[in-house]
Image: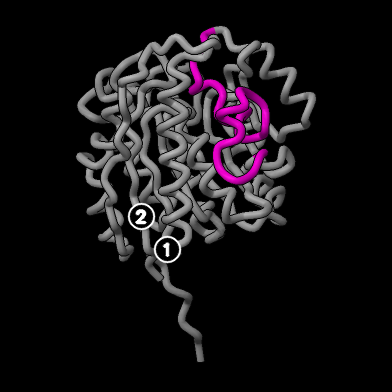
Amino acid sequence: MGKNISILGVPMDLGQSRRGVNMGPDAIRYAGIVERLEELGHSVVDNGNIAVSNKDRNDLSLTNLKNLHAVLKTNIDLQEQVDNIIKSQAFPLILGGDHSIAIGTLAGLAQNYSDLGVIWFDAHGDLNLPDTSPSGNIHGMPLAVSLGYGHPSLVNIGSKAPKVKPENVVMIGIRDLDEGEKELINQIGLKVYTMHEVDKLGMNQVILETMDYLKNTDGIHLSLDLDGLDPLDCPGVGTPVNGGISYRESHLAMEMLADTNLITSAEFVEVNPILDERNKTAEVAVDLIGSLLGEKILKTSPPKATV
């Protein structure tokens, strides 16, 4: 059966230092996301983009966090809209924008789930704190914020904090961690599949273990940063890291997640058309979303009974 899918773009590049990722949502639309999902039998409503103000860009707030006020405002707006999408019984599909938008996405989801599970598909941990961040870029902090660590104004967006419990998070594809992130992972006991584990176990086993690990959650959100894939497949990202997940491995992951029918929301972030090659990364995003939402190479029917 088709889903009711509600698309929301968040054209924000304020969580990091390289311009261009604000064009990501429209690049994904240009690559045909709405048409692709409708062809799969889903009912799709495109809610357009959240308005992102550059008024507070480079604000001089009393913190090392860049553009804190502007990032905060956008994520408050996003939290409210994600909450509304869930309450309308639609599947939220959020298009970024930089990964700081996960703060608002998870805040909105957390108002509707008591034990939300999160699959964090990324090259990076996004677990920096204000005093451990080498850059002050908030796109390196959203998972920490959602776990209750970070600037209070970000942590306390929405009605509760933290938004997600450490035991309800699985990270996949990790290969670039700062020292403070490593310490936090060990401190709170996060489940992490680095590229070493992905290579050693294979993506099939990683996803089987992930879904078993999250079996007691009441909803599962996929937060997918396109830099989780190898730069050969996704050149249009701001912080590429060599040695990533392959295009085919990523599709296998999405297909297996689709088969469980347990993914209740998703966001795809960090597509930067300025750095891309002929919209290649946005097209990969559309391909992966298609697989996550039921697209198959070949539709199969149950074998006919023999007499």
Contact (Cβ within 8 Å) of mark 2 with mark 1 = yes
The amino acid type of the residue labelled 1 equals Ser
The amino acid type of the residue labelled 2 equals Ser
Q: Compared with residue 265, is residue 186 higher up or lower down, i.e. above or below?
A: above
Residue at image x 61%, y 15%? 130
Along the viewing direction, whichever of 19 and 300 lies nearer the viewer: 19
Q: Compared with residue 96, is residue 128 higher up or lower down, i.e. above or below?
A: above
Number of numbered discs: 2
Start-end of magenta stretch: 135-162
Residue at image x 42%, y 41%? 78
Earlier-in-chain disc, 2 versus 1? 2
Image quadrant assignment for residue 77: top left
Horizontal and vertical percent for residue 271? Answer: 34, 29
Q: Would residue 248 be seen by someone viewing this image from the given angle?
A: yes
Along the viewing direction, whichever of 40 and 197 lies nearer the viewer: 40
Q: Compared with residue 220, is residue 127 higher up or lower down, i.e. above or below?
A: above
Question: In the shown orientation, is residue 109 left or right of residue 300?
Answer: right
Mark 1 neighbour class, 10 Å CA radius: few under 14, some 14 to 19, many 20 or more: few
Image quadrant assignment for residue 236: top left
Query: Farthest residue in the bottom direction?
Result: 307
**Disc 2 marks which residue?**
6
Distance CA(mark 2)–CA(mark 1): 9 Å
**Disc 1 marks which residue?**
88
Residue at image x 45%, y 22%? 69
Please say whether residue 185 is one of the residues in the magenta stretch: no
